[in-house]
Amino acid sequence: TLAQQQRDSGGSNIKFYRVLAEEAPKLSMKHNVTAVPTFLFCNSDGSVIARIDGGEDVALVTQFYSKLVNASSTALPSPSQQQPQQSNEQTPPQQSLEQRLQSLITSSLIMLFMKGTPSSPRCGFSRQAVEMLTSSNVSFGTFDILQDEEVRQGLKTYSDWPTYPQLYVRGELVGGLDIMKEMLEEEGGLVSQLELEDYVLQRDGGLSKSPTDEGATTNRNDNAQEALKTRLETLINRHRVMLFMKGIPSAPRCGFSRQIVEILDSFGVSYDAFNILEDEEVRQGLKEFSDWPTFPQLYVEGDLVGGLDIVKEMEESGDLKDLLTGGKD
């Protein structure tokens, strides 16, 4: 798309570089690449003036490219040199970041933005927050802000809360660790203070039932399960080729995930990935939803392909190429 637009617009002095995140881990970590594709718009000195994570919004990508072409007759200023009147050029990426933050915040009923993951917290405050939620026996999603500097800094401004961890419930900011501690000390603890009685898990993993109103609670539990199903369907269809893995493409957390990333990259196709280590609700829910007990899991056009063994078999038979490319060479 961009190559065609370059030919049409005559933006010959603008260069395109395609980098496989897995093959350039240092570069990926430097720019906090956590989703593919990610577009970085740079000045000639290498400074990043804007970025678009995910790249599904083709209109946004082409719109910003057009602005680069229009400005190419003069040197693009570095971030430190930009003048106030040029702030409009940053509007599309900023809007994209706000939309991304809103999507992350509402991706789970209970969402914790922390340093590290629940199984490997990277700071004492995050560890305590995870322990509080776990002891309250509620299912919650998490996001590791150490993996994404844009989210880390953007959420501080969005929420007007300068530190981490940050807890959101039903899309609304609750606060940090101190607020969570205060609520925990109140009668009924976090569950009562945040009105999460209907979302307490039993030891078998199911939602708790109220003995006084079992029928009504059952309906609410069904609604919660339906909400999870809708969320999983949305994630599965977020990209034509969607990989659920341990870690991210630039930094897989297990050998199976690393191998399937290498296979996908070898075909040069666009795909998106979701780190199931950051969201226990998705990790457990997807096993039941797909009736597939292990990870990684690969989906194409919303349909489950399978795990690493299936992908390898299809690669050897030649079927995988046709599936990923839609039969196009």
Image (cartoon, helix red, strand yellow):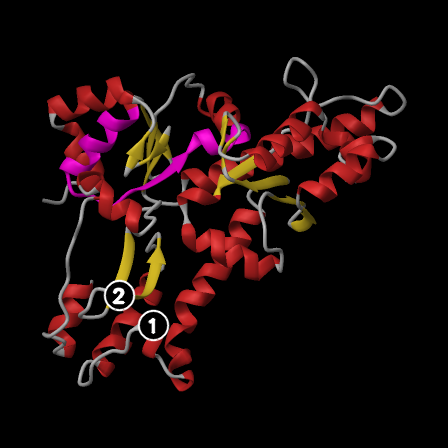
Identified by mark 2, the residue type is Ser
Q: How far is the residue under mark 1 from the one under mark 2?
A: 8 Å
Badge 1 or badge 2: first in the primary sequence: 2
Q: Tell me which segment is drawn in magenta.
A: 257-282
**SS for tag 1?**
helix
Task: Quickly name the residue at label 1.
Answer: 79
**Is 197 in the magenta?**
no
Task: Quickly name the residue at label 2.
Answer: 47
Asked whether, in this view, residue 146 is left or right of residue 58, the answer is: right
Identified by mark 1, the residue type is Pro
x and y percentages locating residue 250 in the rendered image: 28, 39
Who's the residue at 75% across and 22% down the image?
208
Quadrant location, the N terminus: bottom left
Q: Residue 128's image quarter?
A: top right
**Is 280 in the magenta?**
yes
Disc 1 and disc 2 in contact, CB within 8 angstroms: yes
For the question of whether residue 195 can be seen, the reply is: no
Decide which of 252, 209 is in the foreground and name it. 252
Name above or below for residue 13 compared with residue 203.
below
Q: Residue 201's image quarter?
A: top right
Who's the residue at 31% across and 71% down the image?
64
Decide which of 208, 120 is in the foreground and name it. 120
Decide which of 88, 162 is in the foreground and name it. 162
Name, please, the residue furthest toward the right: 212
Name, please, the residue furthest toward the top: 204
Magenta span dominant secondary structure: helix
For the question of whether residue 91 can be seen, the reply is: yes
Quadrant location, the C terminus: top left
The local crowd at label 2, few if under 14, some if 14 to 19, many if 20 or more residues have their Cα within 10 Å, is some
Who's the residue at 31% across and 22% down the image?
307
